[in-house]
Amino acid sequence: MDRLWRSLKWLWGTSWPLYAATVLGTNVFGALAIMLFIRYFIPLPEVESLSLSGNGTGTGIIGVAYFVFAVVIGMAVTFLLFRPVLEWQRAPDDHDPNMVRNLVMRLPVLQTAIVIGVWLIGIAMAGVVASRVSGRLTVVVLVSTVMACMVVAILTYVQAARLVRPIAASALARRFEDSTLEPPIATRLLLTWFTTTGVPLAGILILVWARRHGYFSDSPDAGDIVPAVAALSVTAFITGIMGTTFAIMAVVDPIKELQEAINRVRRGESDTQVDIYDGSEMGVLQAGFNEMMRGLNERQRVRDIFGRYVGIEVAQKALEEKPVLGGEDRKVAVVFVDIIGSTAFAVDHTPEEVVAALNEFFNIVVDVVHRNKGVINKFEGDAALAVFGAPIAIHDATSHALQAARELRQELRGLELQAGIGVASGHVVAGHIGGSDRFEYTVIGDAVNAAARLTDLAKDTPGQVLTNAATLRAANEAEQQRWTLMKSIELRGRNRMTQLARPVRSTLADRY
């Protein structure tokens, strides 16, 4: 008894009581409505024999019998059929998720089938009772109740489909596979219109046809079908609004949810997902949105990780277009940074201390280069190569590179590790170098070699930053004023003289 009480208490806290009340209410109201329609609006004298004042075969008996079947048998069959879902809700890990998922998505269809079955029993009982009075009454009762069954069945379906959404969302939270678990949207919309509006209108046409062919000729009110036509018109209006409203909500609600989800994505909420509770094309759309967001998040994760190794710009270009081996001629500026005395530093410190110092050093280098629109092309042990103007072209790349070198001189002061910094500009070949299975984006050319040679000289130069006159002439006038020309020397591996330049002191640079 205690277990039963706990089960009932749990059940009351779910959406099932509302579900049961809605389905039961719709069917009871439909049954009462059709009985009242037959009793008071059909102009046949035989209808009087269905009242409780007759020979025991009246409307009250039909109503009581149908109510018993609708409530007792209908609820019992529904409970037995949906019991696996109830048990799954209480203990999700103890049940096969595929079985539950398929059952949950078919709940509206199964519920509608149960309703039709209960109605068919009631219709058969009503037909038997009416057949004891006259064949004409039997036809009226059967046609009227069948049409009422169609209207109630579709209303049951659209209501059940809406009420079962929270349960369906839980069942489909992990996986959505089948788009045929529910009728297609177009089929549902057409059936809803046909049964909620078309069936009552068809009833009006049947009444007009019956009157024209003298079906009610022996009735005191023969041919007086105006009340019945009015009742069916009101029914078509009410059920049409109800069916259309539920049909609209079945389509509009998920669209609004998707619209809100898209707005959240626009605001930067990349973990946005929507509930999947529809087994038709709408469910495919919901699942597609979630899959798209997972793909975008995975793509962003790959881009972030990839970008940490090769640079955000290179990673973005590689993801947007298929990389191919080869290069292109580009005008770029190069900043080469090489740590001074790294070998001795490694000997005097533990590997952990060396790594920590290198990370601190290169963290500043990366920040300064990115701030000036450059790209860290590669790290080579204790050195770093930064490129300005490739793979993404930027305006006045040389000025950005020179400014980055000056800022590095300032921000690296005070660190245990110091470095020589060389800046050069010129034409290089920029592209993917390597083999078909393993390659990297790099730049090759005289500017890179010149920057490396200048870096070696910078290690023994005050300020430890050098460029050449050709590079300085390619910069804008404001940047040129922050550098001073020095002597000319022959760089290693070159047969011509190169005039050097270094940044002026900060106090002098501030005058410009």
Image (spheres, rainbow, N blue to C red):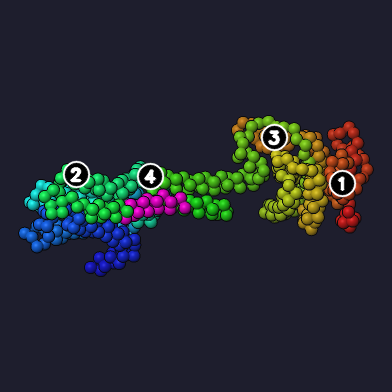
Q: Residue at x 54, y 53 (%)?
A: 263
Pointer 4: what residue? 185
Please report the residue visible at 25 percent of the width from the left and 52 percent of the height from the top. Answer: 229
Query: Which quadrant would residue 423 be assigned to in this image?
Result: top right
Residue 12 sits in which quadrant? Answer: bottom left
- Residue range highlighted in magenta: 238-256
Q: Is residue 362 visible?
A: no
Q: Nearer the viewer, mark 2 or mark 1?
A: 2
Q: Which quarter of the rendering shows the N terminus?
A: bottom left
- Under mark 3, the amino acid is Gly
Of labels 3 and 2, earlier in sequence is: 2
Front position among marks 3 and 2: 2
Determine if the magenta segment contains residue 98.
Answer: no
Q: Which residue is mark 3?
A: 431
Amino acid type of the residue tagged 1 in the rendering = Glu
Query: Considering only order in the chain, which callout, 1 or 3, is on the residue closer to the N terminus?
Result: 3
Give whichever of discs 2 and 4 has the lower sequence position: 4
- Dot 4 surroundings within 10 Å: few (below 14), some, or many (20 or more)? some
Q: x and y percent of residue 248 in the render?
A: 40, 51
- Image spot of residue 496 (x, y percent): 90, 33
The residue tagged 1 is: 477
Whether residue 407 can be seen here: yes
Of the numbered discs 1 and 4, the one sitting upstream in the chain is 4
Residue 381 position within the rendered picture, expressed as x and y whole percent measured from the top left: 72, 45
If you read the primary sequence from the N terminus, does the residue marked by circle 2 or circle 1 appear first? 2
- For the residue marked with disc 4, what is the amino acid? Ile
Q: Does the magenta-highlighted stretch encompass residue 246?
A: yes
Picture disc at residue 212: 2
